[in-house]
Image (tube, grey):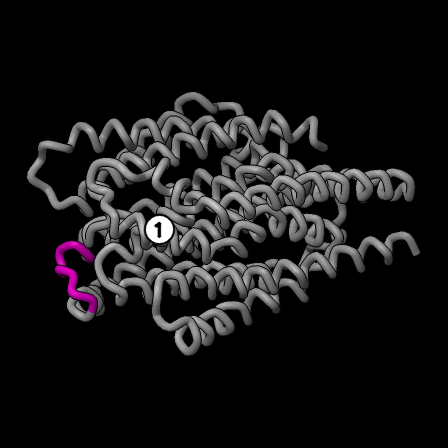
Amino acid sequence: MIRQAAGVNALYLLQVATSFAVVVYISFLYGASKQVDVYFFALGIVAFHQTIFANIISIRGILLWKSDQKNKYKQFIQNIAAFTLIEVLVCLVLLYFWGERLARANDYTPLDINYSVGLVVASLPIVSAMAIISSAWDAQLQFHKSYVYTVAQNILFMAVLTALLKSNIDAGIVLSIGFLLSLIAVFLLVIASERTVLHQLYARMRARSLSPSHAEPWDNFSVYFVLGTAGMASIPLLERILALGLGEGAVSSLNYAYRIANFLGFGISAGISTVVLPLSIDALRTKNAETIRTFFRRLFRTLLILGLIVAVCIVAITLSGEVLVRAVYFRGHFDTVALEQTKLALLGYIGVLLNLAFNTIIVKVLFSLGSYKYTMILYVIAPIMYFTYAVEYADQSIFGLAMSMSLVLGVLLALNAGRLFAARRMLDV
């Protein structure tokens, strides 16, 4: 598992490095300003969409690709397209009726909110299409391709920002234009260069299932998964909405801190979380007890190694968080106020770091076992827990918001880990 994940993780780290370069470049150009706050708030809508649909496509798409029920794959893609269109329309309607009110309530200009959010929302259909193609690559163990194209998008994004530096356009709109244009360019590049996978997708959309329909352990998970992932996706969006009321730079500082936590947490485990689902499915489908036991032994050894690495990261953040933030961001328009806010947010995100490192791996294994209902119910409850704590007990500060997310995600991680150990014991029986 580690051997197969190593190459994927190296490419993911390259992707994260270029993503970091984008964020550092933004902090250098604009610091933690109101315009950057608006852009990161708009980007939160894309993150909400990706958490729901990209994760559904990634997991469900792999499961259906490996299944003989090709008619279900066609229906699945049609559902994704319909839901994406509905989401875009809902966002645009909400923006039309409440965009100006949201802007004035938080001392932003309506122009910033309407144009920045509108441009980013326009990218959602492309994000869904790229996720569908990426799931096809992952199902065929071609994990590297999605990372390569994301690296290309990051480089193009920085190129577009550089080209627009001298334009007399608001910073939030420049950032939104750069994101949309770079995404469109990479999507066109995929269409031009990945004819094989596109032909395979088209064939599966046209094919009829020749084998009799049979139930898989994950066959009825879609409703639970949509509700659960929607619940989890709403937590970062709620955080950004609450942060808009904390003053200039709050949303930006939280995003800058989260990028560091994401690099340290998910950057360590990305390769394993990518390969673990198809490997788990293949092991379980053998129905060989020794093969399954071997898979779980290797899985738990891998999680132990990850735990040791994450422990070192947590100690480093606790002892020298300000040094880390200063080394990454403190240049250009990133001032001392932004430095202090980002440091506090990073300290609050320690629980998020743990969740990013372990939770995706654990949940994907649970899905392969058909054990998902309990996890998805917890995910539906999670935003209620977060909102209650953030509003009532987090003293409306940047550190309080970050710590609220850490507490909720830490509880979910502990419960999911317990479920995984319980499922492992049941397989032994």
Residue in front for this viewpoint, 371 or 310: 310
The residue lying at 27 percent from left, 63 percent from top is 244
Residue in front for this viewpoint, 110 or 222: 110
x, y percent for residue 34:
19, 54
Residue in front for this viewpoint, 72 or 423: 423
Instruction: State left or right for residue 10 relative to residue 297.
Output: left
> Quarter-wise, where is residue 26 in the image?
top left
Instruction: State left or right for residue 173 relative to residue 25.
Output: left
Q: Which residue is mark 1?
A: 342
Residue in front for this viewpoint, 285 or 318: 318
Residue 395, compared with residue 33, is above or below; it is below
Residue 122, compared with residue 302, is above or below; it is below
The verdict on residue 399 being magenta is no
x, y percent for residue 63:
66, 45
> Quarter-wise, where is residue 298 in the image?
top right
The residue lying at 13 percent from left, 60 percent from top is 109
Q: Please provide the residue range marked out in magenta.
A: 106-113
Q: Quick check: can you spot residue 198?
A: no
Q: Quick check: can you spot residue 235?
A: yes
- How many numbered markers are drawn? 1
What amino acid is labelled 1 in the image? Thr
x, y percent for residue 307:
66, 45
Q: Secondary structure at mark 1?
A: helix
- Quarter of the C terminus within the rendering: bottom right
